[in-house]
Amino acid sequence: MSLKTSFILVLIVVMAVLLTHSCEPKTVQDNPSAIVEADIVTHLEELSRDEYMGRMPFGPGDKLTVDYLVRQCKSLGLQPGNGTSYTQSVPMIEITSTSEQDIRVTTQNGERNYNFGEDYVIHCQKTLDRVEIEDAELVFCGFGITSPGEWEDYSGFDMNNKIAIVMVNDPGFGGEDSTFFKGDIMTYFGRWTYKYEEADRQGARGLLIIHETNSAGYPWFVVGSSWSGPQLGLEKESVQNGADIKGWIHLNMAKDLFESTGHDLSQLMRDARKPGFRPVPLNATLSTSLTNEYKRDQSDNVIAIWEGNQNADEYILYSAHWDHIGVGIPVNGDSIYNGALDNASGTAVALSIAKNLSRQASPPERSVLFTFVTAEEQGLLGSEYFALNPTVPVNQIVANINIDGCNPNGPVKDFQIVGIGHSEMDRIVAEELAVQDRYVLPDQEPEKGYFFRSDHFNFAKVGIPALFGEGGYDHIEKGIEYGKRKKEEYTAQHYHAPSDEFDEENWDMRGVVQDAQLYYNIGWRLANNDEWPQWYAESEFKRTRTVSD
Ligand SMILES: [Zn+2]
């Protein structure tokens, strides 16, 4: 070994020592933008304790959770997000409809009778004690979609005192053209929630959706079980003015009904996929009656602000639902559905982001708004209420980052964007992922419409570009198959089960920290520039932003 090589060796050793040293985890003071695992674990552990009783709205865990969140926001130095209050009360109403007289359809050729549960399910979402429908006209309205200038299934037809029968999903589903209503990707127009809302806007007396397993994505029994018990909703305008009955009919009932009125259902369904479709009156009437029982209750959103120092009236909105499904049927002797992942984890991550903001030497330019919303599991109700009754102007909200569930399986190279292709948030995520040496995993099941199933959806509906995603499968040490297996394991064993518990032994928190850091970086970036992420032209939410701007 020459002197020169030994000198080089020494140099390498010295450098290695220096490098190792500089790679040591920096302390919080050195690097205020690093998310700290312990910050997340503290809240996660607390909120998933049995004492919180599965954080059911109105249940014994409701006040406990809300108080805890308010206390945390205060102690972090966040300002109240609803005037002088940290809470926004969300009035809700629970309605149980009971069928009194089954559906009777009168045609020129006689009467047809159908049975509740087997042939159809209907309910009344209004504060009426009793609904009686006597010979209301039936009209086939295609997919029940109105997108002005583009698609008009009601095309100005007067729906007053008429019952619309519509198809599930949208005209793009099952077609060849991936640009026509996004092909098999479910658009908002394909969701039953949209169809109910549109029927209200059209002033229809009722709406019945024809169930088809393939287009709906789930079998008839799911419809039956979800729509036969009590239904919780917001105490909002449609409770007074909406359609009297809403529900689903079995495909067999639809076939029978159309045939008895002399219509070819399959032909009409094909026609409804073509532009220029117009409503088809079936020359038949429907009669039925039901009774309602209802009770009112309220829960709270927790809202807090970290104020910006330059454009304080522009906001980056973080959301995480605090609620879960409470106490239910025991599994292996455990009846408390703790919801550790869903969504104590997202709530804890949002709090850790707030804590990180508080560690910065100075606040960001724009303000950061935190909403811990209630009743997500009951139909995204807390976020819907906030979107309809925002505590800051909606068009001042730059973007939403929604956190619902985290990745407890350790660090991964990918991040799945649910509902990819809606807005420039995609690009921003991709850029911030690159900083972490990670890549974008597109929506793995776009036909299932998961983009419409968490709180960001309500913010998107009022025009706020929204990000919803989750750590992917590509485990840094154990590979893709491992990541996939762990995800499947969760869905099969723990999703909405009492065993969704915080498992300190088996949860690898590095993945949670990784995503928390990503959410933080995106928020910090948007809070420190004048960027307004835009909706892509193809997105069905683009219109709402244009209106609110
Ligand atoms: Zn959730």
Image (cartoon, grey):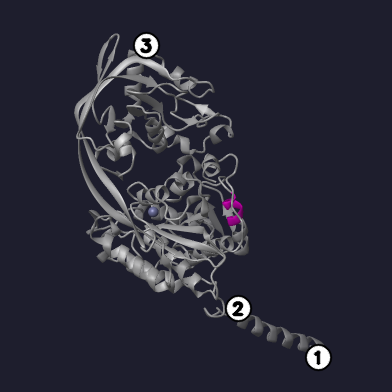
For residue 454, say whether it is visible: no
Q: Residues within 10 Å of mark 3 (few under 14, many from 20)?
A: some
Q: Which residue is mark 2?
A: 23
Which residue of the protein is positioned furthest toward the bottom in this rendering?
3
Q: Which residue is mark 3?
A: 262
Whether pointer 1 and pointer 3 mark residues with C-beta atoms closer than 8 Å, the reply is no
Q: Earlier in the sequence, mark 1 or mark 2?
A: 1
Q: CA distance from mark 1 to mark 2?
A: 30 Å
Q: Nearer the viewer, mark 3 or mark 2?
A: 3
Q: Amino acid at mark 3?
A: Gly
Q: Which residue is mark 1?
A: 3
Asked whether, in this view, residue 448 is left or right of residue 546, the answer is left
Answer above or below: position of 20 versus 97. below
Q: CA distance from mark 1 to mark 3?
A: 100 Å
Q: Quadrant of the N terminus?
A: bottom right
Secondary structure mainly formed by the magenta segment: helix
Q: Give percent across and percent down for residue 240.
A: 29, 37
Q: Nearer the viewer, mark 1 or mark 2?
A: 2
